[in-house]
Every structure is written in structure tokens, then in C-alpha cells.
């Protein structure tokens, strides 16, 4: 009996390990193709050992028009929109977390519904509106739309993290004469640093990889971000510069990786509020 149970347990563990290996391979193979193709002078769609090692693909893409200007545009768009999203989400989540109202639940449900709306379904009226208010083909207009599209989920995340900060800490500050805004800036946000980091990384990553929005709202080639300019590596009649595409993908992914490394310590931290309200 014990041997049969141990055998079944071993079989289940092996099946689970095999499933995890398949999932890991599904993620690892595309990454391996990007790295190997960026160094392979004869890069194609296959994942294979390079015929030789070369940096010619990086030399070809590291130019002002191909890489540096689009990356700068991406940083301006996504960085500005992320900062605006975090600020607006914190200001919107604070009253939802701290004050009880009959309108809180309907408002949160409305936000949840807004997160399910596909951007493609609202781009036509948004495009017409931007033409009317003269925001089409402007960086600030695209930043505003990025912010509006990310705010619903950012508010949900921010509120959930804000709920974990004890209200007693704010009440002590209010007793000392602090305003609600001062308690938000000096007590709540510093204590929910991991939550702010999560919202920042999530918003930035979602905007960084967005192709459709800047493609629709920006018309001038000089303003296009890297998420749109990567399309230039796909030529006519199925011709693709695979080596340059892989090299550009590595450079394009670098800001996201750097951002994650910078906030990884805060992501792995905790609120560390144990004992904060004792006594």
C-alpha cells in the first residue's frame, strides 16, 4: 500500500516537473532566439547556434534615426504617462480607501468595467475627439490617453495596497494638525512603497509595449516611439532583417529591465508595519 502511494506521488511529481519544463521552454526559446540571432551573421527564424559571432547587427541599428530617437520618444511618452498615472491613481485611491460612501462600490465597479473595454473599440471616437481639441499628433495628447487607459487598473491596485496601511497612523498625524494630503504624502505613500513600485512597473511596461495607441495618435515619423519603429524591420514581400530585429529587441527591452532592477528591492520588501500601531 505504501509503495503504491509512493509510486503515485512520484508519478505526479514527475508529471508536474514535465509540465513546468514545457512552460519554461515556451518562455526560454523566444529569448534564446533573440540573443542568438542578435549575434548570428546568418540569423533566421530558427533557434540555432550562431554560424559565427558578430556585432554588425548592433552597429546597424545604433543610429539616431533607427534607435536613439525612438527610444527617447518612448521614454518621454511612457515615463510622463507613468508619473501622471501614479499621481492620479494615488489621489483617486485615497478617498476610496479611507472614506466610506454608498458611491464607493458603484464607482469601483465602473472602474472595473472600464478595464474590460478594448482600446480598439474606443479609438475611433478618441481619434475624432483629439482632432477636435487639436491633440492629434502631439506627445502630450498621447501621454494623456496613455494615462487615461491605465488609470482604472492602477486605481484598483493602489487602493488594495492602501487598504493595508493602518488608518490609526493617519489619525495620529491628524491629531498633530496634519492635513489629509500631508498624511497621504508623508505617511501612507512611504509605507506602501512596494505598492507604488508595483503600479509604476505595471503601468510603464503596459505602455512601453503598446503599438496601437501611438500608431493611431502620432503621425509625424520623428515622434514615433520604439514600439512603432520596430515595424520598420519588417520589409516588403515577407523580407525581415532578423538579426537587426533581434538586436533592436534587446536594446528596446533594456529600459524595462533597468526599471525592474531599480525597484526589485521594493517589490521584494513588505510594508513592515508590525508593531507600528502598538501602544
Image (cartoon, rainbow, N blue to C red):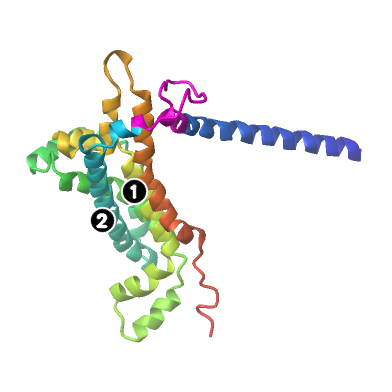
Part of the protein shown in magenta: 34-57
Q: Position of residue 86 (x, y in %)?
A: 31, 57
Q: Is residue 26 left or right of residue 58?
A: right
State which quadrant residue 61 falls in.
top left
Image side of residue 131 versus residue 59, left or right? left
Q: Which mark is residue 13?
A: none
Q: Which quarter of the figure has residue 210?
A: top left
Assign the N terminus to one quadrant of the image: top right
* Image x and y of residue 65, in percent: 20, 35
Q: Is residue 160 above or below residue 7?
A: below
Nearest to viewer (mark 2 / mark 1): 1
Helix, strand or loop at mark 2: helix
Residue 62 location, x and y as percent? 28, 37
Q: Name the residue located 27 percent from the left edge and 51 percent from the top edge.
A: 79
**Which residue is located at x 46 percent, y 72 percent?**
166
**Location of mark 2 (residue):** 84
Q: How far apart, in angstroms, are the residues tagged by discs 2 and 1?
A: 11 Å
The residue sitting at 24% across, 47% down in the picture is 77
Establish if 270 lies above or below 198: below
Residue found at the far right of this picture = 1
Categorize mark 2 by other alpha carbons within 10 Å: few (<14), some (14-19), many (20+): some
Secondary structure, mark 1, is helix
Residue 116 in magenta stretch: no
Please tell me whether the stretch drawn in magenta is mainly helix, strand or loop.
Answer: loop
* Res. 223 visible in picture: yes
For label 1, the residue is 204
- Judging depth in this view, the residue of 62 and 187 nearest the camera is 62
Position in image of residue 64 (x %, y %): 21, 38
Amino acid at each position: 500500500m505504501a509503495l503504491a502511494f509512493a509510486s503515485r506521488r512520484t508519478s505526479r511529481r514527475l508529471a508536474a516537473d514535465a509540465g513546468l519544463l514545457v512552460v519554461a521552454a515556451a518562455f526560454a526559446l523566444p529569448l534564446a532566439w533573440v540573443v542568438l540571432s542578435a549575434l548570428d551573421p546568418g540569423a533566421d527564424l530558427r533557434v540555432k547556434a550562431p554560424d559565427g559571432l558578430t556585432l554588425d547587427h548592433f552597429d546597424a541599428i545604433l543610429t539616431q534615426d533607427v534607435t536613439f530617437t525612438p527610444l527617447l520618444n518612448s521614454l518621454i511618452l511612457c515615463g510622463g504617462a507613468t508619473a501622471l498615472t501614479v499621481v492620479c491613481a494615488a489621489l483617486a485611491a485615497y478617498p476610496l480607501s479611507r472614506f466610506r460612501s454608498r458611491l464607493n462600490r458603484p464607482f469601483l465597479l465602473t472602474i472595473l468595467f472600464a478595464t474590460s473595454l478594448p482600446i480598439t473599440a474606443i479609438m475611433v471616437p478618441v481619434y475624432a475627439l483629439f482632432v477636435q481639441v487639436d491633440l492629434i499628433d502631439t506627445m502630450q495628447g498621447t501621454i494623456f490617453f496613455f494615462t487615461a487607459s491605465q488609470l482604472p487598473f492602477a486605481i484598483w491596485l493602489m487602493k488594495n495596497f492602501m487598504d493595508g496601511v493602518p488608518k490609526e497612523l493617519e489619525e495620529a498625524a491628524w491629531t498633530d494638525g496634519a492635513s489629509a494630503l500631508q498624511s497621504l504624502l508623508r505617511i501612507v505613500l512611504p509605507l506602501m512603497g512596494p505598492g507604488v513600485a508595483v503600479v509604476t512597473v505595471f503601468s510603464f511596461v503596459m505602455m512601453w509595449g503598446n503599438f496601437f495607441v501611438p500608431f493611431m495618435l502620432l503621425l509625424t515619423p520623428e515622434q514615433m516611439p520604439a514600439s512603432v519603429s520596430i515595424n520598420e524591420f519588417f520589409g516588403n514581400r515577407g523580407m525581415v532583417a532578423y538579426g537587426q530585429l533581434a538586436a533592436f529587441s534587446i536594446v528596446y527591452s533594456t529600459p524595462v529591465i533597468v526599471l525592474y532592477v531599480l525597484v526589485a528591492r521594493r517589490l521584494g520588501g513588505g510594508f513592515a508595519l508590525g508593531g507600528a500601531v502598538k501602544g
